[in-house]
Each structure stands twice: as C-alpha cells, then as structure tokens.
Amino acid sequence: MAERLDQPRAARRTLVGPHYDPEAFGQLSERIARFLGTARFLVYMTGMIFLWVVWNSLAPELLRFDPYPFIFLTLVLSLQASYAAPLILLAQNRQADRDRVTYEQDRTAADRNRAEIEYLTREIAGLRLALSEVATRDFIRSELQRLTEEREDRTP
C-alpha cells in the first residue's frame, strides 16, 4: 500500500526505555565536561594514578589490589575516557546550538539596525531637501536689505 502524503504517519512503536529529562542530562554533561577541562581535574587524576601505582608497587602483597601491569587501572582509565568523550561531545553540541541561536539573534538585530539606519538616512535626506526650499536667515536679511535700498532709491 502506497504511503499517502496528505495523511500523518502512524505512530511508531518504540521500545520502552528509561525516561530522563534531556535538558537536565545536558546540563549535567556540561558541568562534567567543564570539570574535565580544568587543571584541578588533571591534578586530581595525576594524584590518584600516582597513589594507585605507589600503593600497588610498595604495599604488602596482601594489600595490593592491582599488581604491576596495573590492568585494573587501565580498565578504570578506559572506562573514564569512554564516558568522558561522549559527555564532552554532548556539551560541545549544546554549545554549538546556543551559538547558532545567538548568531541568528545577532543577525536579526543587525538586519533591524540596518533597516533603521536606512530609514533615518532617507529621513535626513528628506529634511535636507525640505530645508533647501526654506528661506534662511541670511537670505531674508539680504532680501530685506535689497528692498530697503530699493525703497530709499525711490524716495526723492
């Protein structure tokens, strides 16, 4: 049966999964990504790895939980990286969306400003044309002086 374009599609069945607030999850991912990009995180991570290696190298044999090849440390670091990368990408995508909205708002404001400037330019040009037709003070003085001189010339 051909799909009709003038009818809405039938609702698709989806697997029932966990429900979450995408905005809250996005904000959390941004906070985590911001923390991962700080010197404080690097210091904490370096300290933790240093303590891990020292403990598993120098502690008594019974207290070591990850002997020399440090397989568990590698697993923990891989797990941390596998979660950090998508969280950072999600935060970057959200920032790109905000930048896109800001760009659109800036462009709209610039277009509105450009239209207002063009309108004001036309108004100023119109006022200049109107003022060129208005008699200026100097023109009126010169005309009054000319008329006064003509009157004095006529009177004997």
Image (cartoon, rainbow, N blue to C red):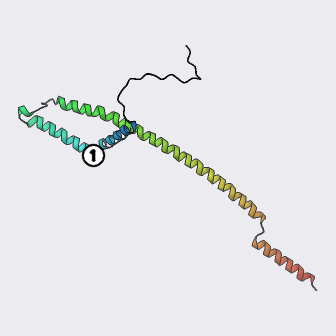
Indicate the position of residue 61 as horizontal and vertical percent values: 6, 32
Q: Residue at x 34, y 36 (%)?
A: 87
Dot 1 alpha-carbon crowd within 10 angstroms: few under 14, some 14 to 19, many 20 or more: few
Q: Which residue is mark 1?
A: 39
Q: Residue at x 69, y 57 (%)?
A: 123
State which quadrant residue 145 falls in: bottom right
The C terminus, quarter of image = bottom right
Indicate the position of residue 130 as horizontal and vertical percent values: 75, 61
Indicate the position of residue 150 as horizontal and vertical percent values: 89, 79
Q: Amino acid at mark 1?
A: Ala
Residue 67 in the figure: left or right of residue 89: left
Q: Residue at x 59, y 49 (%)?
A: 112
For mark 1, give the secondary structure.
helix
Indicate whether 103 appears above or below 130.
Answer: above
Residue with the most extreme bottom position? 156
Q: Residue at x 37, y 25 (%)?
A: 16
Indicate whether 141 appears above or below 69.
Answer: below
The N terminus, quarter of image = top right
How many callouts does the rendering have? 1
Residue with the most extreme right position? 156
State which quadrant residue 153 falls in: bottom right
Indicate the position of residue 74 as horizontal and vertical percent values: 21, 31
* The one of 98 and 146 positioned closer to us in this rendering: 98
Residue 124 in the figure: left or right of residue 34: right
Indicate whether 117 appears above or below 145.
Answer: above
Residue with the most extreme top position? 1
